[in-house]
Amino acid sequence: MSEVVTAHDEAHHNSTGIDTRKLLMWIFLGSDCLFFGSFIATYLVYRNRSLVGPYPSEILDIPLTTISTFVLLMSSLAMVLALNYTQRDKPVAGRYWTLATACLGAIFLGFQVYEFNHFVNLGLTPKTNMFGTTFFVLTGFHGAHVTFGVLWLLTFAFSCLTTSLKERAIIVLSIIGFLMIFFATLMSDWLHVIPHVPFNTVMAVGGAGALILLISVILLRKTSTPKGIAESQTMNLELSGLYWHFVDIVWIVIFTIIYLVSAKDVAPIIGM
Amino acid sequence: MSLIKKIKQILTNTMFHGTETYFDLPKNEFDVPSPQHEGPFGSSLSKSISLFKKLTRSGGHGSPAFYLIIGVILSILTYIEFAIFYVESLGALMIPLLIILSLGKFILVVAFFMHLRFDNKLLTYIFATGFVLAILIFLILMILQAF
């Protein structure tokens, strides 16, 4: 088995001495810089050009976005710890941190779902004004990247960091439990993203989800994964980590430019 | 005349370790004055640089504690960004400050979380090319918009 893995790994090297997959990942990230750079530039070009409201100063919520930025930064920290523990031959800790990264990413997505829903309720849609168009396209594409990253990490934890059917079942259970808490939070009276759900239903879904998550997290502490499996998956985890950190740095730029710099923008003075 | 000579000798003996001329720069490693780390900072500068290198390059990759410290620094920078958003007196200084802080966060994540500091330099050049091109697109758009 180990010989096969070694031959497989050696096949990925080239004259640069870097793993081909890693090289390709960095080229992709460099090109993704152009993708997001174009959207951010478009946002700034059309800044202060909305003829009708709502304007950024009326609806952007800086404290809320700071919290979601913090969540995404912490998910990046969890990702780097997942890779570090996997490299140090501690597959259980590595798997816990991988799942924690996906959970924090999903919490960030929850913040974004709430924000989009809130903005639409306040009358800002992509059709409303230039701010709406550029804002929703930029943050929407970023959210799509985060969604893809969460799916990638969950699939990875499910398929590559496990060996037995039992472990996979436990991971699926933990995902189901987390999703139940996620939707219960969105249904709650406080966020009101999914409206008109009775309080008892919300509590039942949330409580059952928390219980399932707790049990599955406790069950995950014992593993049947041989150490070699985690070792051969290090490069794959590193690639998903690179993607995840890239999504994080894009959000660092978006948080500064879209939220902090232009949050005080009001209606433009017409006829300059 | 003798007084000036005497003063000069005292100065050279006390400050420059007996060497006659200060501007006679060392040409090779044997010319370097025997007490190491001569200068205003003493050995503190070179020691802190070597400590930084040791911390960030411990066996190719950092320890979990090292990444935790980076995470704490990132959180503090985010909090500072959040705090200076509400400082009205900053005025036009706010935007450059925010950009510098976010650039610091960007560099911390790219260098340490994405391991660019530990990795092959080629990867840094590839990513930097994409980043610089993105900034160029941004600048060209802003210039075109002005006309």
Image (spheres, rainbow, N blue to C red):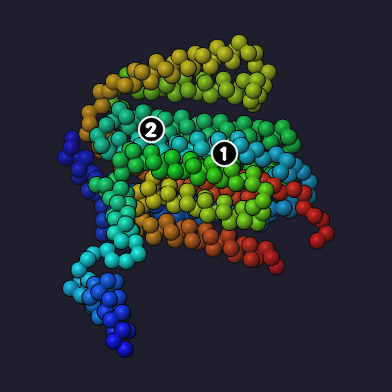
Q: Is residue A222 left or right of residue B68?
A: left
Q: Is residue A8 left or right of residue A245?
A: left
Q: At 64% across and 52% down in the image, what residue appears?
A: B90
Furthest toward the bottom, the residue is B1
Residue B57 in view (yes/no): no
Q: Residues within 10 Å of mark 1 (few under 14, many from 20)?
A: some
Image quadrant in which the N terminus of chain B is located: bottom left
Q: Which residue is mark 1?
A: A66
Residue A37 x/y as whole percent: 55, 54
Secondary element at tag 1 = helix
Residue B44 x/y as whole percent: 32, 57
Q: At 55% across and 35% down in the image, what residue appears?
A: A67
**Depicted A33 relative to depicted A128: above or below:** below
Q: Residues within 10 Å of mark 2 (few under 14, many from 20)?
A: many
Mark sitting on residue A98: 2
Q: Is residue A48 left or right of residue A6?
A: right
